[in-house]
Image: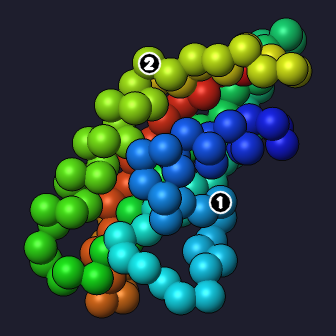
Amino acid sequence: MKEVIKTILKELKTVHSESYYIKNSAKTVKYPYVVFSTSLTRIDRHADGCYLDVDIFCNKGLDQVEIETLSESIKMHLRHFDTMLEDCYMRTQFQSMQAVPTNLDDCNDGIRVFILN
């Protein structure tokens, strides 16, 4: 799973440099930024998969333009992404995109991608 996470982070950083795994670890937060997490699931005896949840944070209040633009860029980049890793063949399948309400002043949008590996 370590190699899959590294690959996801590398791919997200090609779309947007402010991309992080689990939490934003930057000393100074630059908006918008992307945070992703994964959750592993078993498909059958010989295959695992995982869900990739991508959250985008922006400090523009109700102005969703940056979030929508970045969401679309990530979606298009990962829509048919596949690569051969040392431990597995990784391919992605876009599943959904939705606004995620938060109690913060930051806007947040979420993307869910299924990864078969």
Residue toward you, 47 or 88: 88
For image coordinates 30% across by 42% down, the residue present is: 73
Note whether 22 is above or below 77 in the view shown. below
Percent position of residue 56, x then y: 39, 63
* Image-quadrant location for residue 42: top right
Residue 61 visible in this rendered orientation of the protein: yes
For image coordinates 81% across by 36% down, the residue present is: 3
Residue toward you, 39 or 65: 65
For image coordinates 64% across by 17% down, the residue present is: 83
Q: Earlier in the sequence, mark 1 or mark 2?
A: 1
What type is the residue that disc 1 sits on? Tyr
Residue 43 visible in this rendered orientation of the protein: no
What type is the residue that disc 2 sits on? His
Q: Give the labeled residue for mark 2.
A: 80
For image coordinates 44% across by 18% down, the residue present is: 80
Query: Badge 2, how many Cα within 10 Å: few under 14, some, many 20+?
Result: few
Percent position of residue 29, x then y: 49, 84
User: In which quadrant is the C terminus drawn?
Assistant: top right
- Whole-angstrom CA distance, mark 1 to mark 2, is 21 Å
From the viewer's perspective, is 75 left or right of 115?
left
Residue toward you, 78 or 45: 78
Q: Give the labeled residue for mark 1.
A: 21
* Image-quadrant location for residue 22: bottom right
Tag 1's secondary structure? strand
Note whether 34 is above or below 80 in the view shown. below
User: In which quadrant is the N terminus drawn?
Assistant: top right
Query: Badge 1, how many Cα within 10 Å: few under 14, some, many 20+?
Result: some
